Amino acid sequence: MSQTSDLSWHQSTEENGSQPPLSLQNVHVSYRTRAGSVQAVRGVTLDLLAGESLALIGESGSGKTTLGLGIVRLLVDTAEVSPGQIIYRRDGRELDVLSLAEGPLREFRWRDCAMVFQSALNAFNPVLKVWDQVWDTAKAHNWNNRSEVRERFLDLLRFVQLDPDRVIDAYAHELSGGMRQRTLLAISLLLDPQILILDEPTTALDILTQRTIIDLLRRLKEDLHFTMLFISHDLAIAAELADRVATMYAGQVVELGPVSEIFYRPRHPYSLGLIRAVPTVTGGFEELSSIPGSPPDLINLPSGCKFHPRCPFASERCSREEPGLERVGDNHFAACWHTDAVQEDIERNGLRGRRAA
Amino acid sequence: MATATDVSNVSPRGSTSPHSVLRAIWSSYFFRKFLRALATIFVVTTIIFFLVRLLPGNPIEIYVNQLIVTYGMPVHEAQDQAAALFAIDLDEPVILQYFSYLQNLARGNFGQSVLSPGTTVTEVILRFLPWTLFSVGLGLLISFTVGVLLGVIMAYRRDSFLDHGFTVVSSIISSVPDFLIGLLLVVWLGVQWKIIPIGAMRGAYSSGMVPGFNLEFFADALFHGALPISTYVLTSVGFWMLSMKSNTISTLGEDYVTIAKARGLKEWRITTAYVGRNAILPLFTILTIRVGFVVGGSLLVEQIFEYGGIGRMLGQAINQRDYTLMQGIFLIITFSVIFANFFADVLYGWLDPRIKLQDN
Ligand SMILES: Nc1ncnc2c1ncn2[C@@H]1O[C@H](COP(=O)(O)OP(=O)(O)OP(=O)(O)O)[C@@H](O)[C@H]1O
Ligand code: SF4
Ligand SMILES: [Mg+2]
């Protein structure tokens, strides 16, 4: 029972499905604020393929969390998702997530699509034991066999390398940050979801705990072929865990492609900037802050390409016309007028660029 | 400093005899609190003893004045009568009075009422205190329940007409002192509009009623308690509403609530076990502390409605400078405040699993 291969029950049904389990089509999200409408996500079209691990990278404020929360419909009341469509597929059935009614939405959440949140420190109800919250989750999805649920959760705790007997009856405050994050990860696997969304699963953890979690996620990906959408600041982690990478800027996917393409042959100046901003020492746990300039004001967006005020490749056209995602290679897309110039620059100066100082 | 990792070492399934460790912390914590409570009671008792004697006039003077004013007695005669009546020697040095008071107190003897010799303070308290506990307790219970429920509704319907309406009304009512509300009830409902029979509602129950555990008596007690109880409810319900509303709103923003939704939990389960339980937690402490002020808080309201509770007795005792009765009632007040604080701690530790370890 406790072998990892038992942790995932959905393998067989999934392999044959050629349809992606999740398709985002032209998804827009805006927040109503006093200052105006914050355009947090602007027309994201993205397929999450069965068994793949897709990394969403980008600076703070680029709309990654907003997109993740939008998929499970957990955005605050002031957020509006429109226009756009989110299609979820499982076993040949197709759901329009944005128009799900209360009941089906509850079923969709966690059973079909589980999400591990950015700040797991506060993820647990402080007055309920871990087990009570696990049991709540199972019951909410009509899984009423107590001993079976408990058995499965103990297995999952072992999988995330926690002492199961110690954690299961603990309160959140009795667990360290890393333990909580791993417990949440274990709970996210409870119902064997088809899709797992992980929002910065390693931020705010010490390096050792980060390592443990990354190793766990790698096992999820490599051994269990989980379909994962994971959001990260950290390019090193994205490089390690992702099959494909989507770079987000100002609420849009500006580059999308296989992990090796994005990290070794980026064609969008922003992706290139992100890569060049990572310190060369392969620690890589730095925040991405060293692209000159600051992210755009999402209420009053710049004209043309949203990156043009910060872009070293910008031309006059960039400030007038906004580029769309175009194919630039095998499964590789970028939204930029001057992808060729980016390629030339890499050829001339190397991927990491010629550092002046 | 109890950090998360420290705590994990003493958690129930740790390595070294964790239960005894926990119990030791627990018991010593309460032992310390108990000692502190005893000391507080002693200090307050002492202060009250001297304070009541600092009030202008003494029971005999007041009684003598009464005799002179009401019966037109000559001064000498009045003094003689007073001296014969009272079993208190006010000429004894205060410090000696104090020690004999303490001695009696240690034996659980509160002494006799100065003004009604033969009646012990304990008798007075036992007779009137239950009515105060009944009326204020019921008032508190009603206002807490109603306030908490309305507070949650207001939080869930934030910025609705209902929310704004309740907020305005409750802010206004909670800023009016209770005795004023009591007076307004008497003046409007009783005197001007004559909606309710103010006169018949005096006392704790109708004369001729035999106290007992039956419906008839309970209904009668409710009838007599209705005005003070309504006053307590009106003055405090706004506080519970607004506190519960703001606690609920902030709890709704907690990550664990969002995650509970993400886990697909039913709305009702989230509202009760995730939002409600955490939002109400701090209110329980305030509730228990307020229970401690039951006796003290009844003072003015009971006098306005002439309700037969301990607050009204205290009013009389103060007016007549009945030292021993005042001391007795103040001691009960002190005791209930301290006990309530003590109880609030126990309750909170019991309701909130995080508390037990934090004190260490
Ligand atoms: N509740 C909200 N109301 C208004 N604006 C919001 C709200 N939540 C997020 N935003 C704005 O939407 C934009 C996208 O935020 P989001 O949290 O999705 O970014 P992110 O990419 O996840 O950033 P980070 O890496 O810091 O987590 C930001 O500009 C943010 O200020
Ligand atoms: S379109 Fe122009 S401004 Fe935008 S990224 Fe490409 S080169 Fe830079
Ligand atoms: Mg985020």
Image (cartoon, coloured by chain):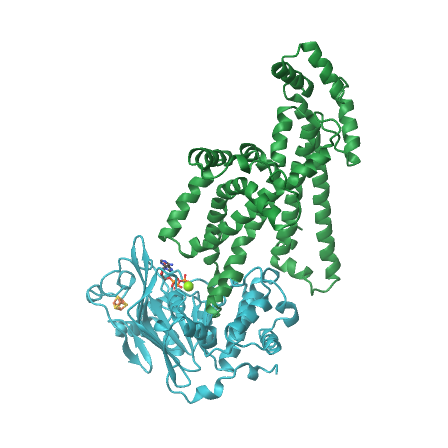
Chain colours: A cyan, B green
**Percent from the top left, x then y, of residue A77?**
37, 61
Q: Is residue A220 visible?
A: yes
Q: Based on the displayed image, in which of its 4 quarters is residue A178 positioned?
A: bottom right
**Percent from the top left, x then y, of residue B60?**
69, 18
Instruction: Give B216 or A27, whichever is nearer the viewer.
Output: B216
On screen, residue B73 above or below A14: above
**Percent from the top left, x then y, of residue A354?**
36, 66
Instruction: Give A261 or B175, whichever is nearer the viewer.
Output: B175
Q: Based on the displayed image, in which of its 4 quarters is residue B209 positioned?
A: top right
In this rendering, position of residue B293 left or right of residue A102: right
Q: Residue at x 47, y 40 (%)?
A: B174
**Percent from the top left, x then y, of residue B20?**
75, 58
Q: How many marks?
A: 0
* Ligand 1 positioned in quadrant: bottom left
Q: Is residue B40 visible?
A: no
In this rendering, position of residue A264 left or right of residue A343: right
Q: Residue at x 61, y 17 (%)?
A: B70
On screen, residue B74 above or below A255: above
In this rendering, position of residue B107 left or right of residue B164: right
Q: Residue at x 63, y 67 (%)?
A: A169
On screen, residue B226 above or below B4: above
Q: Based on the displayed image, in which of its 4 quarters is residue A175 positioned?
A: bottom right
In this view, the residue farthest toward the front is B208
